[in-house]
Image: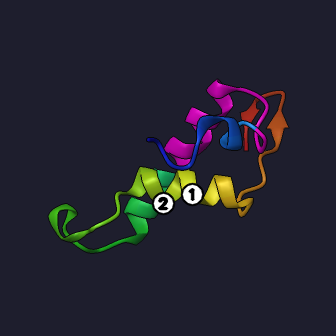
Amino acid sequence: MIYPPLDELLKHVDSRYTLVTVAAKLARKILEEDNTIDNERAIKAVSIALHDVADGNIKVERMKAGIK
């Protein structure tokens, strides 16, 4: 089973496209800030990003030029 569930994630964003974009941007930011080797990390950056979205820690703001 996928956790967090997709329906829970979609409560915090307006579409699946927005969810993918936000998760990718946040995962890149997490990887830039993290200095450990990928094999040493137990939880991957995308999983951390999706958990942050599900917990409501990330505020998604849609702009005309894109997502911020």
Q: Amino acid at mark 1?
A: His
Real-space Cα separation, disc 1 to disc 2, in angstroms: 5 Å
Find the residue positioned furthest to the left.
Answer: 39
* Numbered range of the magenta stretch: 11-25
* Image position, residue 27 (x, y; %): 46, 52
The mark found on residue 51 in the picture is 1
User: Is residue 28 in sight in this rendering?
Assistant: no
Q: Secondary structure at mark 2?
A: helix
Q: Is residue 32 left or right of residue 10?
A: left
Q: Is residue 14 left or right of residue 8?
A: right
Residue drawn at 67 percent across, 32 percent down: 18
Which of 24/15 is in front?
15
Instruction: Tell me the quarter of the picture where residue 37 sits.
Output: bottom left
Which of 56/64 is in front?
56
Q: Was residue 20 drawn as part of the magenta stretch in this picture?
A: yes
The answer to the question of whether label 1 and label 2 lie on touching residues, with beta carbons closer than 8 A, is yes
Residue drawn at 29 percent across, 74 percent down: 35
Q: Is residue 38 left or right of residue 2?
A: left
* Image position, residue 60 (x, y; %): 77, 46
Q: Amino acid at mark 2?
A: Ile
Classify 10 Å Cα crowding around label 2: few (below 14), some (14-19), many (20 and above). Answer: some
- Residue named by callout 2: 48
